[in-house]
Structures are given as structure tokens and as C-alpha cells.
Amino acid sequence: REIFINFINSLFDPYREAILDDSKDISCDSKGSGKFALLTHQEIVRDYISLYSPYRGLLLYHGLGAGKTCASIAIAEGLKHSKEILVLTPASLQQNYKNELRTCGDSLYKLNQHWDWIPVDVNLEIIETLSNILSMSVEDITKQGGVWFVDIRKPSNFGSLSTEQKVSLNKQIEKMIASKYTFRNYNGWRKSDLEKPDFSDGGRYNPFDNKVVIIDEAHNFVSKIVNKLKKPDSMSMKIYEYLKNASNCRIVFLTGTPIINYPNEIGVLFNMLRGNIKVLNFYVDIGSTRKINNDRIKKILKPLGIADYIEYSPSSKIIKITRNPFGFVSEYDKKIYGG
């Protein structure tokens, strides 16, 4: 309990003054006025699921207008250079999420700025530099003959651009977003997407490995799974199993109503956020003279701080170990488990 309290205090300490300031508007209704900035609760969410935090999943169930989409985008922007971003939405909300990216996402996605057209010549070094900065392929930059770039020292000139220039700029931003974000509809999965071979990992393939998976209107997604629980070969159940087994994956669920039909929906939802609990089994060859028991095994492994559950069976000589999630360390004080 003490460790948890200290953790919470350290997590929220940088935002303490902002949280205690009752004069701040905590809604997103006024985000259109002035320069966009994340609200305090969105900053906390962004820091909770980051490159340097060990947490696998997060459920955002704020009410309407509380900024769930922008909070998820803040998480994605912090991880987009190290992981692929996969956004699953209902078909009707996909464009809305893309529009929010231009408000809450990278500053280079915003239109209302001063844009300069930079033509490129045959200097490959310059083209590659622009490619890295803008997340565009060298081929796309070469094909369009240049790039649009922001000059933050000057006022916005977007309104004075010609229709053709605006179309060109919008296409560039769409390509920049597409290079980092992949969008799929709930029903857009095919069987071939889930059974693609990958021989680099012993034939194992999981479409959610090494990705940040953001699921909008998650209650609809979960409901589809719950309705197919007795059909393990259904597409919904396969996606469910892949999400639970995904490695190096971060999952963010957005919903205002985590449960809509059945109580077990919350269990299915958190199964995906937590992932499967993997148990490691080791056979111990102790010889005929040495004695070993459960307490001795725990005494050896506890100082490492990486095991959540340890059990040794003398009859089978099998040690069962459940590892902590990556980044979590167990602490013990006076023979009492500390978390």
C-alpha cells in the first residue's frame, strides 16, 4: 500500500497545481480558441502510456466531450517513432479521428500556419533529411518535386494559398499521417490478415505485435467478441486471442460506456488490456543428495524482483513462475510482499 501511494504521488506531483486550480476549464469545448494545448488529464494519460512506462493497456471512459480522442492521439504521438500505430474505428468515425489528428497531433498536421514550398533538386542528402523530418518517402518527395514546410516565425498564410496549393498541401499531410497511422474498420479484417506467415519468428505471426492499438467506441468492439464467445473460429474471437497474446503491444480503449449489454463485457475488455498471464515451467534436476523445497526456490528467485508468482512441486520437480509485466519489480520488506 505504501509503495502504491508513493507511486501515485510521484505520478501526479507535476500536475498538482493544475489539478488544484479550479479556475481552469476541464472541458474540450473551448479547444478551438487560441493555440491548442493538452488539458491536464490528457497530459497525465500521455505520460502514463509512454515509451518509458511499463503499462500495457489503458481504458479511457470519460464522458462526451472530455477529450478521449485527443488523449489517445497524445499517446500515439509519443510512441509513433518506435511503434506502428493501428487505429480501429467504426467506419462512420474514421474520418472524425483523422480530423482530430490535425488538431491534437503533430504540429506539421495543422493547416493554419505559414507554409512555404521548398523545391528539391537532385541532392539526395537534402531529400533524405526532409523525408525523415516529414515522415514521407523519398519517392513521394521526388515525385511531387518538393515539399511544404512550416515557417513558425511568420503568421499563417493558408487562406492566401491557391486552391491547387491547398490540395497539394492536404495531400502531403494525408501522406504524412498515413506513414505513421494505419486505420481499419471493425469489420475490415479478412482471414488472410490474421494468418499471414512470418518465418522470422518461427512461423508465429500476430498482427498486433509491436504496435500501439487504439480502439474507438470500444464497447461495440467488445460486444462483437462477447456475442461470439462460443464460436472460437469466428473472426471476432481470433482478433480477441491475438490481442491477448500480442507482444510489445500497447492497447488504448476509448468508450463512454464500457458495459452496454452483459456484465462479462468488462472482463473481456480487461483481458485484452492485461494480456494473457504467461506461466513459465522449468524442470529442476537436483540430484539425489540435495534437498529443495518451495521456500528454498523462493529464497533464490525473490531477490531478482522479476517474479510475481513462484510455485515448486517436489513430486514433478517442476517450478512454475509467473513473471512481472516488463518494467515492474517486486519489492519485499521484512518477509512481507510489497508490490
Image (cartoon, helix red, strand yellow):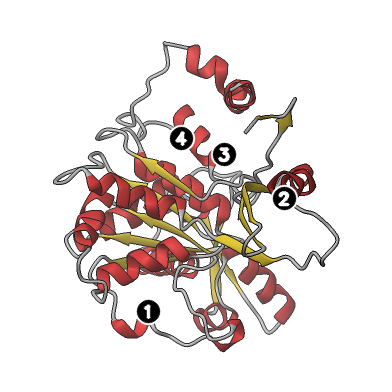
Task: Please determine whether, in this image, residue 230 is positioned above or below residue 202.
Answer: above
Q: Residues within 10 Å of mark 4 (few under 14, many from 20)?
A: many
Picture quarter with the N terminus: top right
Whether pointer 3 and pointer 2 mark residues with C-beta atoms closer than 8 Å, the reply is: no
- Label 4 – label 1 distance at C-alpha: 33 Å
Q: In the image, what residue type sits under mark 4?
A: Gln
Q: In the image, what residue type sits under mark 2?
A: Asn
- Mark sitting on residue 293: 2
Q: Is residue 164 left or right of residue 52?
A: left
The residue lying at 67 percent from left, 65 percent from top is 282
Q: Which x, y percent locates residue 274?
A: 45, 50
In the image, which is nearer the foreground, mark 3 or mark 2? 2
Q: Is residue 106 left or right of residue 196?
A: right
Q: Which x, y percent locates residue 220?
A: 21, 54
Label 4's element? helix
- Decide which of tag 2 and tag 4 comes sooner along the chain: 4
Disc 3 designates what residue?
47
Whether pointer 3 and pointer 4 mark residues with C-beta atoms closer than 8 Å, the reply is: no
- Label 2 – label 4 distance at C-alpha: 49 Å
Disc 1 designates what residue?
194
In the image, which is nearer the foreground, mark 1 or mark 2? 2
In the image, which is nearer the foreground, mark 4 or mark 1? 1
- Label 1 – label 2 distance at C-alpha: 44 Å
The answer, for residue 16, to whether it is visible in the render is yes
- Label 3 – label 4 distance at C-alpha: 9 Å
Q: Is residue 330 left or right of residue 76?
A: right
Q: Nearer the viewer, residue 260 or 184?
A: 260
Disc 4 designates what residue?
42
Q: Nearer the viewer, residue 186 or 194?
A: 194
